[in-house]
Image (cartoon, helix red, strand yellow):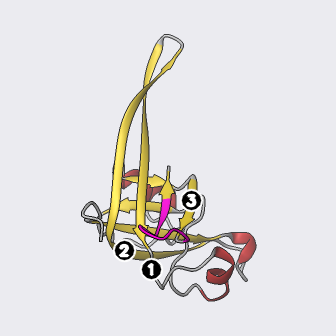
């Protein structure tokens, strides 16, 4: 195991409304241990203004519970990672229900700067060594 894989993360996987029987979003929370977490703040110049820009990288070691979105969508067993999902550093016990105080946007905001929305994902489990799933945002 890579000695940098020391973090616990909470992954919120989203079943998209278009894919659910009731045409509503559904979120599944998964706690994953022994992951890699990196966050950086860079400054972006916008005209005469400087704006902070956070970037995140998470690596999750190969896991038998991982499913592609299509496979996971059938049963919501295990976990999947797709663009739009949320990742939070540490163990977060809150559920995303869509009700006031428990929306994805609110959970994300409550946990910033140690939380991000996934904008990039790759399955790097075909390599000989260091098999992992990578999420970025």
The residue sitting at 48% across, 84% down in the picture is 65
Dot 1 surroundings within 10 Å: few (below 14), some, or many (20 or more)? some
On screen, residue 72 above or below 27? below
Q: With 74 as the anchor, is 33 left or right in this view?
A: left
Which mark identifies residue 32?
Answer: 2
Please identify the quarter of the rendering in which residue 43 is found: top left
Answer yes or no: do the residues labelled 3 and 2 have beta carbons within 8 Å?
no
Answer yes or no: do the residues labelled 1 and 3 have beta carbons within 8 Å?
no
User: Considering only order in the chain, which callout, 3 or 1, is on the residue closer to the N terminus?
Assistant: 1
Dot 2 surroundings within 10 Å: few (below 14), some, or many (20 or more)? some
Dot 3 surroundings within 10 Å: few (below 14), some, or many (20 or more)? some
Q: Name the residue under label 3.
A: 121
Q: Element at badge 1?
A: loop
Which mark identifies residue 63?
Answer: 1
Answer yes or no: do the residues labelled 1 and 2 have beta carbons within 8 Å?
yes
The x, y position of residue 86, in whole percent, is: 48, 61
> Cα distance, mark 1 to mark 2?
10 Å
User: Does the magenta segment cover residue 133?
Assistant: yes
Closer to viewer: mark 3 or mark 2: 3
């Amino acid at each position: 195991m890579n000695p940098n894989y020391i973090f616990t993360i909470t992954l919120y996987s989203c079943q998209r409304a278009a894919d659910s029987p009731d045409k509503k979003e559904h979120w599944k929370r998964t706690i994953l241990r022994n992951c890699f977490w990196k966050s950086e703040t860079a400054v972006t110049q916008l005209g005469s203004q400087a704006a902070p820009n956070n970037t995140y990288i998470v690596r999750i070691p190969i896991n038998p519970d991982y499913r592609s979105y299509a496979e996971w969508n059938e049963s919501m067993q295990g976990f999947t990672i797709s663009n739009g999902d949320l990742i939070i550093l540490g163990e977060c016990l809150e559920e995303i229900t869509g009700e006031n105080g428990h929306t994805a946007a609110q959970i994300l905001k409550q946990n910033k700067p140690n939380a991000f929305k996934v904008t990039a994902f790759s399955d790097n489990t075909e390599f000989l060594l260091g098999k992992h799933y990578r999420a970025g945002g």
